[in-house]
Amino acid sequence: MTQTQHTPTPYMQKAQSDKAGDGWTRIVNLGSGTEVAKISSIHKKGQRKAGDFEIEEANAEFIVRACNSFDDMLEALENVAIDGNIRGEFLSYIQNVIQKARGEI
């Protein structure tokens, strides 16, 4: 896994039409306006289908929520893991999730 740092959060959403005016692309931006990623249709231009924008919007909302809450969720799991009250298979599960979140496995 790369050691390059991601663009700092928080992220937000911004809707924008493409240059050809062929539907919409959902863009995920930092609060500063720096572009982070574009969420676009899996369908080619001119072949967009009903509901594509709603799917793009839902995907963008999910990505923004996940990214903006990631650090807090990881910290909460780390605190649970060192609490001492969690043992056995559940502790192993939490430790595995933490390693995945850190990109260690």
Image (cartoon, rainbow, N blue to C red):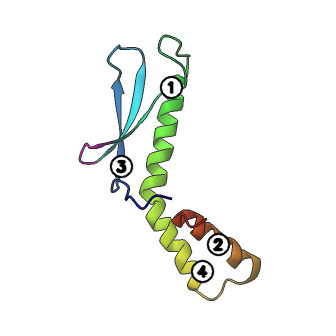
Instruction: Tell me which amino acid carries mark 3.
Output: Tyr
**In the depicted structure, whether residue 15 falls above or below residue 69:** above
Q: Disc 2 on helix, strand or loop?
A: helix
**What residue did someone put label 4 on?**
81
Q: Residues within 10 Å of mark 2 (few under 14, many from 20)?
A: some
Q: Earlier in the sequence, mark 4 or mark 1?
A: 1
Identify the image quadrant of residue 29. top left
Q: Which residues are magenta?
A: 31-35
Instruction: Tell me which amino acid carries mark 1.
Output: Ser
Q: Disc 3 on helix, strand or loop?
A: strand
x then y, percent, for residue 65: 46, 51
Q: Earlier in the sequence, mark 4 or mark 2?
A: 4
Quadrant position of the C terminus in the picture: bottom right
**What residue did someone put label 1 on?**
41
Q: Is residue 92 magenta?
A: no
**Gap in Å between the C-alphas at discs 4 and 2?**
7 Å
Q: Is residue 34 magenta?
A: yes
Q: Residues within 10 Å of mark 3 (few under 14, many from 20)?
A: many
**In the depicted structure, whether residue 6 falls above or below residue 13:** below
Magenta span dominant secondary structure: loop
x then y, percent, for residue 53: 48, 25
